[in-house]
Image (cartoon, rainbow, N blue to C red):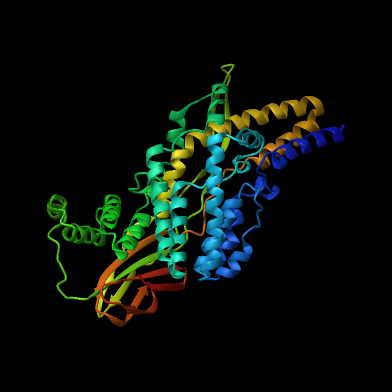
Amino acid sequence: MLKPIFSKLVCILVVFTLSGCATMQFRDLFSGYAQQMQPVKLQAINGQYEQALQQVPERDISDTNYVLALLEKGRLKHLAGDYKVSKHYFSQASGYIDEQKLKAKLQLSKGVQNIGAVLSNDNAITYVVPDYEQSMMHSYQALNYLYLGDHEAALVEIRKANLVQRAALENNFDVIDNAIASLQDEVELDWQSISTTYPEMEDVIGEAKNGFQNAYTFYMSAVLYEASGELNDAYIDYKKALEIYPDNQYLRNDVLKLATKLGMSDDLSKFEKRFGKYKKNNQKNMGQVVVIYDQGLVEERDEMLLRLPVYTSNDDMRFYSVSLPVYHKSDQYLPNAQLSINDKVLSFEQIVKVEALAAQTLKSQLPSLITRQVIRLIAKEKMRKKMSKEGGDVGNILANLYNLTSERADTRSWLTLPQSSKILRSDLSPGYHNLSLKVGSLNKEINLDVKANRITLVNIIATGNHIDYKTINL
């Protein structure tokens, strides 16, 4: 009796793990992505980037988490200063994302993957890189090209990052995918009950209006455009960044400066009413230092159980426990940072909170996530009844055991991104300068070679008690 029951259960597992264009590793069925990435984050937070890289699980191109592995490896290689290999990983990820978008348009293989998701969990669906992660990928790829001496390629990547944000804004990507939406007729969900039970995540989201408008990318592009003399494009992107962070003093000054240079009299009048008069530096041949400060590592998605009343097509109300991803307010300690330049102490100001973009993205995905979870529970219940009917108590126990252990929330996200990034900008005379960075109780000396009438870009990375930096003259 046991053998046919066990064989049937194994067959079900084989269907969703081996079918279709994307496969799911067995460990992903019972262990969440965030949990698997803990050793990687532990090494990375201590600045041991190459060791962290060795801990990233290997994925082949058919794996549902293949692109995530590429992103993690690309970021870790970037942090380790191996920009050539980082560029390779990000190029692979970018190509894969483009193929994924084409498949989504053609609706290829999605049905098979959704069957796998219904029988297991959302980890059986190929990871779709959200817009904020795509824009960050192109931003880091732009830095890779800069450090490798290819400024033109860096500008191309920045334009790609901006295209991602523009497309997201136009497409209003908060839509339940068609294959799952077509199954919604089977259940009726009490969305009011869901909204009062599921955490709002407002303490994580803060003032982020959506999950794809990324001021970090706008600022990076504006700086690169300004350095290459494309002042109109720079002005547009500084304004976009300012819309997201209107209290950022450096953004205000950048917008006022370029509005003055470009003779944007109407804009200038409007901005000066809001921010005050532009204070021009009358010293000639000054250089400018732009500092981007990346701090910490982004929080992972947590997992929570939500008990929901669900009405089936027979008007039968039952309570089901669904496992959903959620972001909680970070308990990560991020000390304040200050930079001393010629005995003048300057403070950093926020340009992006990655965890806020991540939480806002998750919030927009909730309708489709919850719908899939409920459909999955009903499908598993049908499987349990069938197993119980054919195998009695043993079949019932096996099916219940499988249902219980395979019910996992989708905790996947790019986990080697910084938790937040801040900026700082100052004029400096040409020549060598020694800047002093203070992060909590830690101190770091930063050596700069400032060129007249040029921008010197400094990227500082602070994780745990480890601080690195890279400088380049644009």
Q: How many marks?
A: 0
- Indicate the quadrant where residue 418 lies: bottom left
Q: Quadrant of the N terminus?
A: top right
Outermost residue to the top: 314
In the displayed structure, does residue 330 sit left or right of residue 342? right
On the question of residue 151 being in view, the answer is: yes
Q: Nearer the viewer, residue 276 or 430?
A: 430
Q: Nearer the viewer, residue 37 or 324?
A: 37
x then y, percent, for residue 214? 37, 51
x then y, percent, for residue 97? 53, 48
x then y, percent, for residue 362? 46, 43
On screen, residue 438 above or below 230: below
Q: Residue at x 75, y 26 (%)?
A: 386
On the question of residue 34 being in view, the answer is: no
Q: Quadrant of the C terminus?
A: bottom left
- Indicate the quadrant where residue 296 lies: bottom left
On screen, residue 91 above or below 54: above
On screen, residue 287 above or below 406: below
Q: Residue at x 30, y 54 (%)?
A: 237
In the displayed structure, does residue 149 sit left or right of residue 239? right
x then y, percent, for residue 354? 42, 54
